[in-house]
Amino acid sequence: MISLVNVNKYYKNDEESLHVLKNINLAIAPGEMIAIMGPSGSGKSTLINLLGFIDKQFEGQYLFEGKTLLTSSDETLSKIRNQTVGFVFQNFSLIENNTVFENVELPLLYNGYKFHQTEEKVMAVLKKVGLADKADKHLKQLSGGQQQRVAIARALINVY
Ligand SMILES: Nc1ncnc2c1ncn2[C@@H]1O[C@H](COP(=O)(O)OP(=O)(O)OP(=O)(O)O)[C@@H](O)[C@H]1O
Ligand SMILES: [Mg+2]
């Protein structure tokens, strides 16, 4: 489903070039669970950004379900990302001034759901992560671990 062939990634500026991903070959089958491990600064987030189509500046080949998506429009990529990729960002990237419910609902709205169609799904996934009773709370009223679970709920909502 996911296949990287001879992938290299450099971060370049005027003075220097940092070779972060060095000739990566990776195949991930549907349903396969993998963990990417390595020391801080070794390139895990760089690799994840590439797998999630956030970063298209690399050398080599990335096939997603057998297709190169590099030439796809940003709009197409956003759609594929919305429907197939769930991210829990390192800093959670939650919207501070929105409620727990609104944060988890957002990917559904991007995916074409109307406001009144989201409640059942959002509440189901919040229940799954143990936060059903916090749905109306603002992010600031939650502990770090609870915020992390909101991020997990948001990452799962479109595939739930
Ligand atoms: N936008 C960028 N421009 C230049 N260098 C970058 C950029 N992003 C990351 N780097 C560098 O690339 C290397 C890999 O960074 P990356 O964020 O992929 O590491 P990581 O494995 O996710 O680390 P951590 O475990 O700390 O999150 C690091 O040396 C970092 O300084
Ligand atoms: Mg990282």
Image (tube, grey):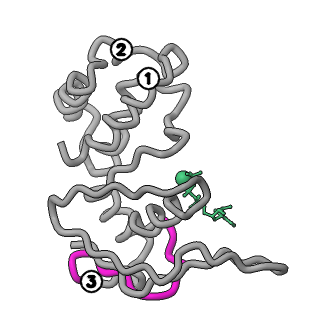
Residue 50 in the magenta stretch? The answer is no
* Amino acid type shown at disc 1: Thr
Residue under label 3, please give it. Answer: 67
The disc, 3 or 1, on the residue closer to the chain's N-terminal end is 3
Give whichever of 160, 77 is nearer the camera.
Answer: 160
Say whether residue 11 is left or right of residue 117: right
Residue occupied by mark 2 = 134
Tag 3 secondary structure: strand
Q: Which residues are magenta?
A: 54-66
How far is the residue under mark 3 from the one under mark 2? 41 Å
Residue at 66% x, 74% y is 11
**Looking at the picture, which amino acid does disc 3 mark?**
Lys
Number of numbered markers: 3
**Is 65 a magenta residue?**
yes
Determine crowd level at label 1: few under 14, some 14-19, many 20+ residues with C-alpha closer than 10 A: some
Where residue 70 appears, x then y in whole percent?
41, 82
**Residue at the disc numbered 1:** 99
Residue 69 x %, y %: 35, 80
Tell me the quarter of the image containing the N terminus: bottom left
Tell me which corner region of the image, top left, top right, bottom left or bottom right, holds residue 150.
top left
Asked whether the residues under the numbered discs 3 and 1 touch, taking CB atoms below 8 Å apart as contact, a structural biologist would say no
Residue in the picture at 41% in, 22% down = 146
Q: Residue at x 21, y 26 (%)?
A: 128
Q: Is residue 47 left or right of residue 154?
A: right
Q: Split into 4 quadrants, where in the image is the C terminus?
A: top left
Could you tell me how far apart the alpha carbons at marks 1 and 2 are, in whole angstroms? Answer: 9 Å
**Above or below — where is 63 with respect to 81?**
below
